[in-house]
Amino acid sequence: MQREDAIFADARVVWSIDSPVEREVIMDGGRLRQIKEIELAQLELRYAHTRIERPEGVAALAGSIERFGQIIPVIVLREEMHVILLDGYLRVKALKVLGRDTVIAEIWECKEEEALVELLARTHSRKWDLIEEAALLQELHDRYQLSQMRIASLVGRKQSWVSGRLALYRTLSEDLMALIRTGSISTWTATRVIVPIARALPEHGRLLSENLAKVSLSTREMSHFFCHYQKANRKQRENMVRTPALFLKSMRAQEEAHEAKVLQGGPEGKWLKDLQVVTHILRGLAREAPTLFYRGQTNLDRRLLLTAFEDSQKQFRELEHEIRRYDAYPGKSASHCQSVSAGSPPTGDQPHPQTLPDHGPAGDQGEVARETETALSLRGAFIPCA
């Protein structure tokens, strides 16, 4: 029977530390749940395998508890002679680090599967790791034989949410799962990098997981690693999975050297490099022109190609205008340089009239003439200053 001096409170309100914890009772969803101080030795850590170890989190939490005391109770399930810890594994570890013997706990009294369902339903307001959620869902599905649809309805989620996490959980090997639980590898790295690699090359997946357990790499670094792995050759891939940290260190050194070179060259260096790229592209286009413009080509195909060329030519005219605007050619007037807008290459560059392609019937001669003139101006558009 409930004590007369019991305290009733909304479950969303933090319990008062001034009240005797062993007497406090809260109302949660129509149920009376007692909060009391219990011995750590009484706890059965039945779901420790579903949680990820976070040494840095334990250290920070221990410091907070030492300074302010335990603010939020852990959640336990009382089942006959057992007291099962459902939530609060980091808090229990922090208390053990501090040498404490007791923990403040919220005691649930219901069926174990009901407790797991309620715990998962609370994930809407608490950040859980993906694997921790998946592990609890696995318990409900396998141990208590609940269907995915039934679990989804109980925890207030879509069935796809449940099936997705269960599928992910089953793709992870026991060795990889152990590394995730100990915090050696993040869930993101395991699911987005190691698992895809292991599907294609199991040996590479094993080597990568073993070597990643020895170093601490961020999600951003692993994303960078995977992008390079996908493009690397066989020998490079073998080196990458054997020494992932060394590979990333080498890549950072190359990037820093490139940044230093760009900074040293300044905007002038970038301008020259960009023009070299443009020149290389133009040479490639000139080599492809005989293939793209041919006898009997349809007007539509030819017009599409020439329209794209004319757009590019327009950009070069604008660039030339900007250069002349700022006296880029000191000592020479604009008339000393061949204008792009003239579109008239030197006589020596003109093809023989007989070599011009036959573009179609006589009715198209005007259009053909205009298009031919535009095409022939391609080389004249980039003639250097005299």
Image (cartoon, helix red, strand yellow):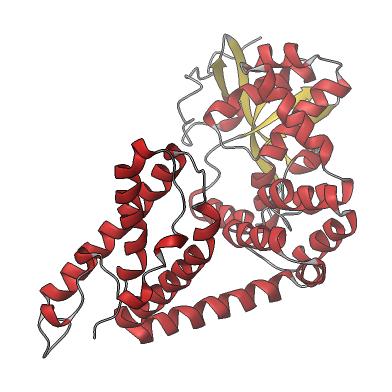
Residue 109 seen from this side: no
Q: Quadrant of residue 249?
A: bottom right
Name the residue rendered at 84%, 60% in the picture.
204
Name the residue rendered at 24%, 86% in the picture.
386
Q: Residue 257: horizontal and vertical position, in percent?
A: 50, 83
Give the position of the N terminus as an image quadrant.
Answer: top right
Q: Residue 307: horizontal and vertical position, in percent?
A: 35, 47
Label count reads 0
Q: Nearer the viewer, residue 379 or 75?
A: 379
Q: Nearer the viewer, residue 322 or 245?
A: 322
On screen, residue 119 versus residue 212, left or right, reads: left
Q: Is residue 270 above or below residue 373?
A: below
Name the residue rendered at 81%, 47% in the picture.
177
Q: Residue 166: horizontal and vertical position, in percent?
A: 77, 29
Residue 69 seen from this side: yes
View extreme (bottom): residue? 331
On screen, residue 178 versus residue 97, left or right, reads: right
On screen, residue 232 versus residue 336, left or right, reads: right
Q: Quadrant of residue 171?
A: top right
Name the residue rendered at 36%, 80% in the picture.
272
Q: Residue 285: horizontal and vertical position, in percent?
A: 48, 63
Q: Nearer the viewer, residue 158 or 277?
A: 277
